[in-house]
Amino acid sequence: MRCITYAGETVTTTDDVAAVLVELTAALANRGKAESVDIPIMLDDGGGRSDAELVIGVGNDVLSVAEDWDGPQPDFSEAAERLQRMLDDLKPKAVAYTIPDGSDEVDPYGDFDDPSERP
């Protein structure tokens, strides 16, 4: 379990949620963005599960610290996967290079090292 410190408050969540939350916060900050996210948390008074809403990204610091936890580990994997999808959506998409139809050449755009072969 991890203790998340945010805006002077602390909440407890699972290792997987905390790890993705920190990565997502950094990725958003690197892009100059901020997003609102919900994460599942465990209440300190033993009252069970709840949710916390945070604004993460640029201008919002998130600290994750290991915490001793005596109770059973909750299954917050669905939330971790949702945060991971948000992180994956921030990653650049690969663009495939295709040769135009009807071209028999390996490189239809010419050899750019040889100016005489440029189109």
Image (cartoon, rainbow, N blue to C red):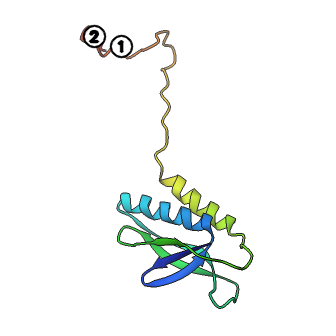
Residue 110 shown left or right of residue 99 in the figure = left
Task: Please tell me whether mark 2 sits on a helix, a strand or a loop.
Answer: loop
Residue type at mark 2? Asp
Residue at the spot x=49%, y=43% of the render?
93
Q: Position of residue 84 (x, y in %)?
A: 58, 58
Residue at the spot x=74%, y=76% of the render?
72
Nearer the observer: mark 2 or 1; the answer is 2
Question: Label 1, on which residue?
Answer: 110
Corner quadrant of residue 50: bottom right
Most foreground residue, 81 or 89? 81
State if disc 1 and disc 2 touch (CB < 8 Å).
yes
* Mark pair 2, 1: CA separation: 8 Å
Residue at the spot x=68%, y=65% of the render?
78
Question: Label 2, on which residue?
Answer: 114
Q: Position of residue 36 (x, y in %)?
A: 49, 72
Q: Position of residue 4 (x, y in %)?
A: 52, 75
Instruction: Assign the C terminus to one quadrant of the image.
Output: top left
Q: Which mark is residue 20?
A: none
Residue type at mark 1? Gly
